[in-house]
Amino acid sequence: DAGVIQSPRHEVTEMGQEVTLRCKPISGHNSLFWYRQTMMRGLELLIYFNNNVPIDDSGMPEDRFSAKMPNASFSTLKIQPSEPRDSAVYFCASSYGLAKNIQYFGAGTRLSVL
Amino acid sequence: KQEVTQIPAALSVPEGENLVLNCSFTDSAIYNLQWFRQDPGKGLTSLLLIQSSQREQTSGRLNASLDKSSGRSTLYIAASQPGDSATYLCAAHTNAGKSTFGDGTTLTVKP
C-alpha cells in the first residue's frame, strides 16, 4: 500500500481564498484523523471520522473550517475564508479502529496563507 | 482535559549512549499510548503502541514503558546512533479515538 496520501504537499494562497486539503487513507482503514501542527501549538487533533462519520470535531478552531468524508477512500479539509494564522502543516492519519491500532500519518500539507 | 508533557524539549548525546525520553499525561483514563518519530519536514512515523493493559513494548533498540497510575511513559533508546536524530512525540489516546500529543523531544545524536 502507498500509505496515507495527502495533496497538495504545499499550498500558498492569499488571505480570503478557499483552501481544500485532500487525503486518501490506507485501504481497509476505517478511521481517519485530521491534525494541524504549528510551532506555537504543537500537534492538534482537529476532527476524526469512523466509518465515514465524524465522531468528534471539537478541535476544529472555527466555523471557517469544515471536513468531509464522502466515502472510505477520500476526505477533505476545507478552510473558507483562509487567514494568515491558518498557516501550518496539516496532517491526515488513518487507522483500523478508532483507538486500538496504530495511526499512520501522511506526509502533510504545508499551508501558507499570505 | 488531557495534557501531555514531554521533558526535556531537546536532548543532545554522543553516539552510543543509552537515553530515556519522558512523557507524562494528566488523565490516566487512556486507552493506549503511542510513540512517534518525526524527521524535519516529514510526517510522523509510529514507533511503538502500548495498550493500557500493558507495561512495556519493545522494538529493536527501542523500549517503551507505561505506568498509567503515575501518568508516565518512557521511551528508552539503547546504543544511540546519529540516524536516531529526530523529534520524538508521545500521544495519549482515549477509547473514543481522541488523541492528545506532547510537544516532543528533539534528539540529536552526535557522531
Image (tube, grey):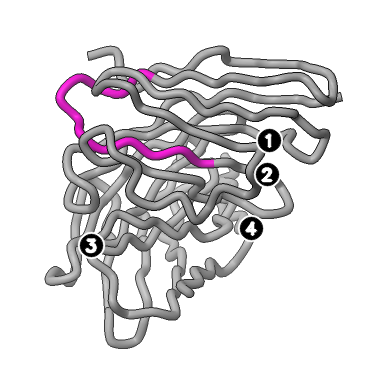
**Earlier-in-chain disc, 2 versus 1:** 2
Query: Does the magenta run of residues contain A34?
Result: yes
Residues at marks 2 and 3 touching, judged by CB atoms closer than 8 Å: no
The residue beneath circle 1 is A88
Q: Could you tell me which secondary element the residue under label 1 belongs to?
A: strand
At 61% from the left edge and 42% from the top edge, which residue is drawn? A37
Q: Nearer the viewer, mark 4 or mark 1?
A: 1
Query: Does the magenta run of residues contain A14?
Result: no
Count the marks: how many? 4
Question: Within the image, what quadrant is residue A28 found in?
Answer: top left
Residues at marks 2 and 1 touching, judged by CB atoms closer than 8 Å: yes
The residue beneath circle 4 is B10
Q: Which residues are magenta?
A: A24-35
Q: Could you tell me which secondary element the residue under label 2 belongs to?
A: strand
Q: Could you tell me which secondary element the residue under label 4 belongs to?
A: strand
Q: Nearer the viewer, mark 4 or mark 3?
A: 3
- Amino acid, disc 1: Ala
Q: Nearer the viewer, mark 4 or mark 2?
A: 2
The residues bearing labels 2 and 3 have C-alpha atoms spaced at a distance of 26 Å
In the image: residue A92, left or right of residue B10:
left
The residue beneath circle 2 is A38
Q: Residue furthest front?
A: A63
The residues bearing labels 4 and 3 have C-alpha atoms spaced at a distance of 30 Å
